């Protein structure tokens, strides 16, 4: 019984050490890249509540979106996809303890209805990268939030 208790205590200690490193020991670059991957996964899943939670309350972009408008338009544009995969190529990351910029090339693959093919074609024809501007709003690694998303070539329909 004592051996079993020592094994459990050892496993608990190992887990606590790992969690401590994960929560406090990773670099800002590693933290923001993990959040970027989670954001891409949320978009692929069309989990709009999760996407919204990853945008700052004061989100604003060059297309006239605030936080609500960005999520609503993304939901409309991507809502027709039955299957969606975003293939990303990391081009650059700049990170400080509280600010970061991630530069990605994004290609869309998927099956869908309605405007899905038009949306995928527009995204896949962009030659310039996407810029994700991040701000860390708290002390934890999951406190990184997107302040702005931008692509120089993207034109929004009027």
Image (spheres, rainbow, N blue to C red):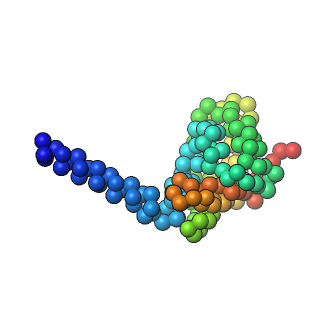
Residue 102 showing in the rendered view: no
From the top left corner, tell me how far across and down residue 35 is, in percent.
Answer: 55, 53
- Left or right of residue 64: residue 111: left
Q: Nearer the viewer, residue 91 or 67?
A: 67
Name the image quarter holding the C terminus. top right
From the viewer's perspective, tell me whether residue 14 is left or right of residue 52. Answer: left
Residue 28: % across, % down: 52, 65
In the displayed structure, would residue 33 be above or below residue 3? below
Q: Is residue 82 above or below residue 145?
A: above
Q: Position of residue 120 (x, y in %)?
A: 68, 42
Q: Residue at x 65, y 55 (%)?
A: 146
Q: Residue, x 18% and y 45% (percent of image)? A: 5
Q: Nearer the viewer, residue 143 or 9?
A: 9
**What residue do we see at 39% from left, 60% from top?**
21
The N terminus, quarter of image: top left
62 left or right, relative to 3: right
User: Looking at the image, which residue is at 59% across and 60% down?
Assistant: 136
Q: Quadrant for residue 17, please give it.
A: bottom left
Q: Say if residue 98 shows up in the picture.
A: yes
- Going by the picture, which residue comes out furthest to the right? 158
| Residue 24 at x, y percent in the picture | 45, 62
């Amino acid at each position: 019984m004592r051996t079993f208790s020592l094994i459990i205590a050892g496993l608990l200690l190992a887990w606590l050490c790992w969690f401590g490193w994960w929560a406090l020991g990773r670099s800002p670059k590693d933290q923001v890249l993990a959040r970027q991957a989670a954001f891409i996964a949320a978009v692929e899943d069309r989990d709009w509540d999760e996407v919204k939670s990853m945008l700052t309350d004061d989100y604003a972009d060059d297309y006239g979106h605030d936080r609500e408008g960005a999520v609503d338009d993304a939901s409309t544009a991507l809502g027709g996809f039955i299957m969606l995969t975003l293939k990303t190529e990391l081009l650059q990351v700049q990170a400080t303890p509280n600010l970061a910029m991630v530069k990605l090339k994004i290609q869309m693959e998927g099956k869908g209805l309605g405007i899905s093919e038009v949306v995928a074609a527009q995204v896949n024809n962009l030659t310039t990268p996407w810029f994700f501007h991040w701000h860390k709003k708290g002390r934890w690694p999951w406190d990184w939030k997107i302040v702005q998303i931008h692509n120089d070539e993207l034109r929004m329909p009027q």
